[in-house]
Amino acid sequence: MAPTRWGFVSAGKISNDFKVALDTLPKEEHQVVAVAARNLESAQNFAETHNIPTAYGSYAELAAQKDIDVVYIGAIHTQHAPVTTMMLQAGKPVLCEKPMSVNSREARQMIGLAKENNIFFMEAVWSRFFPVYKKIREIIESGAVGEVKAVTACFGGNISHIPRVKERSMAGGSLLDLGIYVIQFATMVFGGEEPEDITTSGHLSDGGVDEIVTVVLKYSGNRMATLLCCMSAVVANEAYVCGTKASLKIPNFWCPTEVISPDGTHEFPLPPPEKPLNFKNSTGMRYEAMEVRRCLQEGLIESPLMTHAMSLQIAGIMDQARKVVGVVYDQDKE
Ligand SMILES: NC(=O)c1ccc[n+]([C@@H]2O[C@H](COP(=O)([O-])OP(=O)(O)OC[C@H]3O[C@@H](n4cnc5c(N)ncnc54)[C@H](OP(=O)(O)O)[C@@H]3O)[C@@H](O)[C@H]2O)c1
């Protein structure tokens, strides 16, 4: 099988980590053939660091390059919709960083375009592809925890100084950056079922974005998910799946290497990075890259593990929660 040829949009922090993650996979399977940044020098520096043959000073040049199988979009949230649209219109399959959009309206447009043109498109909810998530699904399906009644998860850190997190104009706030992970965890465990009710409480930061938010999802059959995200305090960063017989604990649930279950701890270590990483456990992005390659080879336009419907459900929950907290982005007014 020919290698999957990646084009990168942006030369920022997560792009660095995704390239390091790709480097843990066989070169005959994954190659990065070009990188584009808003500024040519920055693209050239990234290309030099990561041995990428072509660097562009605009995203449009990458969109025009022929020998690219899939584009990875590592730009900030507000760029996801416009740049994904540019790439899909150029016929390029896309893996777009989370959150795939600022709101559901953008998400619907992006997914509509991918479907209309029959092109692969996926939101990079990398957690879903970790071996630990497969193990969690297997344990739940085996009945070892009984009927799942509750999910709890919290995710946070003091990251309120980071411009893209604190600025409303950059779609900052805890929900889009961190909340997406606790929400995707709950919706994964409950199999994409629509919650009967969503209750939210939260506080705005001085900069007018959602600083700390709790979201409670009420499901049929006396089941609940209680979720917390916070951009100003260090929290436990754990998730629990609570069943009628036992519970599962998942430390670092957004990029986990272990699940603690009734029959012991199941460990899935990650390969070490060959270059420095910006974020925790980023070599685990290799699993979403493997899934993208599989989907492309099989001619799928979405992954069954992170479908378009799942992305839309998560975006809808975040829209509702953000509205309660009182955060309105410019994109919401369009
Ligand atoms: N999967 C994960 O674990 C994970 C972890 C962290 C972040 N992320 C996601 O990745 C995305 C990027 O995060 P990051 O930490 O890598 O961000 P970053 O390094 O601050 O910025 C990424 C890129 O966004 C572009 N950019 C920055 N400021 C901009 C502005 N004012 N206007 C237009 N474009 C701008 C730049 O692209 P150019 O290089 O083209 O100039 C920059 O390199 C976010 O959406 C975030 O949610 C995911």
Image (cartoon, rainbow, N blue to C red):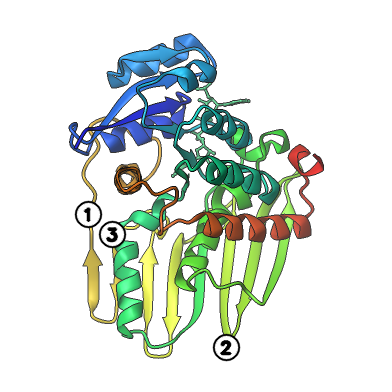
Q: Secondary structure at mark 2?
A: loop
Specify whether residue 99 is in view: no
Give the residue type that dot 3 points to.
Pro
Residue lying at the far top of the rendered structure: 41
The quarter of the picture where the C terminus appears is: top right
From the image, tell me which residue sits under label 1: 269
Give the residue type that dot 2 points to.
Gly
Q: From the viewer's perspective, is residue 80 above or below residue 305?
A: above
Q: Position of residue 110 (x, y in %)?
A: 60, 42
Q: CB under 8 Å between callouts 1 and 3? A: no
Where, by quadrant of the figure, is residue 24 drawn?
top left
Q: Position of residue 172 (x, y in %)?
A: 65, 41
Q: Secondary structure at mark 3?
A: helix
* Numbered circle sitting on residue 131: 3
Other-residue count near label 3 (Cα within 10 Å), few / some / many at <14 / 14–19 / ≥20: some
Q: In terms of sequence position, does the residue under pointer 2 or pointer 1 come before the other?
A: 2
* Numbered circle sitting on residue 127: none
Q: In terms of sequence position, does the residue under pointer 3 or pointer 2 come before the other?
A: 3
Q: Position of residue 310 (x, y in %)?
A: 53, 59
**Residue at 30% of width from left, 73% of height from top?**
138
Ligand 1 lies under 8 Å from the Cβ of mark 3 = no
> CA separation, marks 3 and 2?
29 Å
Residue lying at the far right of the rendered structure: 333
**Residue at 72% of width from left, 38% of height from top?**
168
Q: From the viewer's perspective, is residue 119 above or below residue 82?
A: below
From the image, tell me which residue sits under label 2: 221
> CA separation, marks 2 and 1?
36 Å
